[in-house]
Image: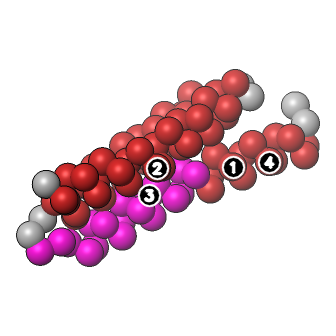
């Protein structure tokens, strides 16, 4: 039960903010492949992280991969938004 609580809490910490950033990228008029790429990367990252945490013992490589993919979405969306705000339309 504690593992499920940890997975759910980690999901709740990162996914809402990631989806909000993807929404902002969408609102800036990004192409469909960027939006789909961000969403697919986020989904794969969260599935990998959940799988890694749910294993007994925990699979560190899946947890690390999951967090790396999640942070890739966060950083990628933030860089896109900063670039768009600095360079303009």
Q: Are marks 3 and 2 in contact (CB under 8 Å)?
A: no
Tell me if mark 4 has few (under 14), some (14-19) or many (20+) residues whose alpha carbon lies within 10 angstroms of its own.
few
Label 1 environment density (alpha carbons within 10 Å; few <14, some 14–19, many ≥20): some
The image position of residue 21, as x and y in percent, is 62, 39
- Name the residue tied to disc 3: 69
Q: Reply yes or no: does residue 61 show up in magenta.
A: yes
Q: Residue 52 at what x, y percent from top left? A: 22, 64
Contact between labelled residues 2 and 4, with CB atoms less than 8 Å apart: no
- x, y percentage for residue 47? 28, 49
In this rendering, the answer to whether 53 lies above or below 78 is: below
SS state under label 1: helix
Point out which mark residue 78 bears.
1
Q: Secondary structure at mark 4?
A: helix
Alpha carbons under labels 4 and 1: distance apart: 6 Å
Q: Nearer the viewer, residue 48 or 4?
A: 4
Main secondary structure type of the part rendered in magenta: helix
| Distance Cα–Cα, label 4 vs label 2 | 22 Å
Q: Which mark is residue 82?
A: 4
Tell whether label 1 touches label 4 (CB within 8 Å): yes
The residue closer to the viewer here, 77 or 57, is 57
Q: Residue at x 90, y 43 (%)?
A: 87
Mark seen at residue 13: 2
N-term mark: 3 or 2: 2
């Amino acid at each position: 039960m504690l593992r499920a609580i940890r997975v759910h809490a980690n999901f709740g910490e990162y996914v809402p903010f990631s989806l909000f950033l993807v929404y902002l990228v969408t609102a800036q008029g990004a192409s469909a492949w960027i939006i789909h790429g961000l969403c697919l990367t986020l989904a794969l990252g969260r599935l990998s992280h959940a799988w890694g945490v749910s294993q007994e013992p925990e699979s560190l490589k899946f947890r690390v991969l999951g967090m790396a993919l999640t942070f890739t979405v966060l950083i990628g969306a933030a860089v896109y938004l900063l670039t768009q705000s600095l360079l303009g339309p």
